[in-house]
Image (cartoon, grey):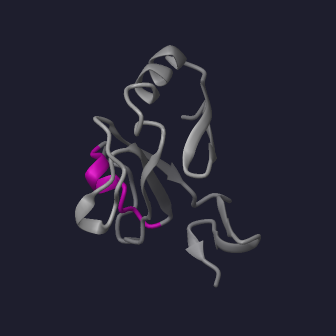
Amino acid sequence: MGGHRAEFLDGRVEKATAKKNEEFLHSVLDTDAGARYLGEFAIGTNHGITRFTRSILFDEKIGGTIHMAVGASYPETGGQNVSAVHWDMICDMRDGGQIFVDDELFYESGHFVV
């Protein structure tokens, strides 16, 4: 998989590209004022799940993955972004993926390093 990229600035998708269906990607991001904003970000921590099932509500919890959604956030968790869109995306980080926080390595290859 792959072939798509989103660049964020202050929680907003400023640039997005896709190898396939790029026009559709842009149409979703332009749905309303909140559609380009990050509405959810989470790190999957269930290492008992070892393979993808194609059910995003299950797969987003796989240990070693991260997931985010552009668009609406969940008010019950304190989120305030409003949009007709809530588009979940999962990234498998188990083979070299990294997260840096304040320029320090925080997460690598599916595991916290702090």
Residue at (47, 44) in percent of width and height: 37
Q: Is residue 12 above or below residue 60?
A: above
- The x, y position of residue 42, in whole percent, is 43, 63
Q: Is residue 65 visible to the viewer in this orientation of the structure?
A: yes
User: What's the residue at 44%, 67% (across, down)?
Assistant: 63
Residue 65 relative to residue 105: left or right:
left
Magenta span contains residue 9? no
Locate residue 95, reporting x and y percent: 63, 58
Could you tell whether 73 is left or right of 109 in the image?
A: left
Q: Residue at x 64, y 80 (%)?
A: 113
On the rendered structure, is 47 left or right of 1?
left
Residue 5 in sight in this render? no
Quadrant holding the N terminus: top right
Q: How many marks?
A: 0
Percent x, y of residue 112: 58, 77
Q: Position of residue 87 (x, y in %)?
A: 36, 39
Is 105 located above or below residue 81 in the figure?
A: below
Q: Is residue 42 above or below residue 111?
A: above
Q: Quadrant of the C terminus?
A: bottom right
Please give the range of residues in magenta: 55-63
Residue furthest bottom as drawn: 114
| 112 or 28, nearer to the observer | 28
Q: Residue at position x 51%, y 50% from top?
A: 91
